Amino acid sequence: MAAEYSGHRCRHFLLFLALATILPASRAQLSPTFYGSSCPAALLTIRTAVRAAVALDARTGGSLLRLHFHDCFVQGCDASVLLDDTGNFTGEKGAGPNAGSLRGFGVIDTIKALLEVLCPRTVSCADILAVAARDSVVALGGPSWTVQLGRRDSTTASLSTANTDLPSPASSLSTLLAAFARKGLSSTDMVALSGAHTVGQAQCQNFRARIYNETNIDPSFAASRRAGCPATGGGGALAPLDASTPNAFDNAYYGGLVAQRGLMHSDQQLFSGGSTDGQVRSYAASPAQFRSDFAAAMVRMGGIGVLTGSSGQVRRNCRRMN
Ligand code: HEM
């Protein structure tokens, strides 16, 4: 009886050993060749659609890059940002940082529709966002990087996390650093990723307090921005985040910060006598260093909280779960 019992235990132990060897392999990781055989046309399809959209409207490149950021900072890069509200589901689109501000959803819909024809139920919306962000940066003249693939899509979203975890333009440097640290990103990553503000636009309500009240701002820059952004009322008027080369993915954003021409309070916080001043000066002086740090930081951001293996799903329509 005792021998039989210990034989039983031995079999359990062998089963445990077998599982222990298999499990790490099945805890899937991202890979650049994830769609190599399941959807060989995926990357070219996304690139072609992004290029066309950016050629039509350069701002869309920035909008697609920002979508990936707002996805990754809320529940990880799981396309939760793309889910529409319904009668019994609340998504993230109504969150303060997203409402009336996020753009580019139609481009993602177009890409998803194409991919559902080419390789149904194969390419996740979260991966489309990651590749579209890279292709947008490239289309605007920025650096390229290899996108890790194999993310899966969430069946949930979090309005409350979108409201708490996405940084506000009123943030101090320490608040910005803490928001990125919460996602596992370093101070260096925070400063490099903020270089995304070398493209795209912001609404008056997001920079009004700075151009009317702050003193660490170039006076002629403040005056010119005030002309397009009344002190009260209509807050939707747009201004480029990088005044000197608004549609080029270059390092001019950092030169602007050194010249006290950061548009939003949060932008100028990166160069206002604190711990990140040196890095801002380096990027202002070296486009190559900015390009390589930005690319590396994008890969890290794209790895935040991803769903892999059999977690989540591959949505057929990015706006709703299957
Ligand atoms: C560091 C903290 C950040 C803050 C506080 C912040 C805040 C903002 C705000 C308030 C806007 C303007 C939205 C509007 O007026 O409608 C904006 C635009 C933008 N942000 Fe950020 N952002 C940050 C980091 C990032 C990162 C990490 C990325 C991407 C890697 C990014 C990409 C963009 C882009 C491209 C735009 C322009 C979008 C467009 O024109 O449609 N931002 N950001």
Image (spheres, rainbow, N blue to C red):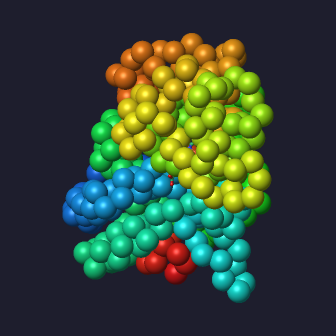
55 left or right of 126?
left
Where is residue 215? Give x, y as percent.
74, 24
41 left or right of 82?
left
**Res 277 quadrant in image:** top right
In this rendering, does residue 152 appear at all? no
Q: Which of 288 and 181 is in front in this view?
A: 288
Where is residue 313? Give x, y as percent.
50, 70
Q: Which of 2 and 74 is in front in this view?
A: 74
**81 vs 27: above or below:** below
In this rendering, does residue 194 appear at all? yes
Where is residue 60? Give x, y as percent.
41, 57
Residue at (72% x, 84% y) in the render = 88
Q: Nearer the viewer, residue 242 or 231?
A: 231
Residue at (57% x, 13% y) in the render = 278
Where is residue 155? Give x, y as percent.
60, 71
33 left or right of 108?
left
Q: How many marks?
A: 0
Query: Is the N terminus in the top left, top right, bottom left or bottom right quadrant?
Result: bottom right
The single residue placed furthest to the bottom in the displayed view is: 87
Residue at (71% x, 74% y) in the render = 90
36 left or right of 156?
left
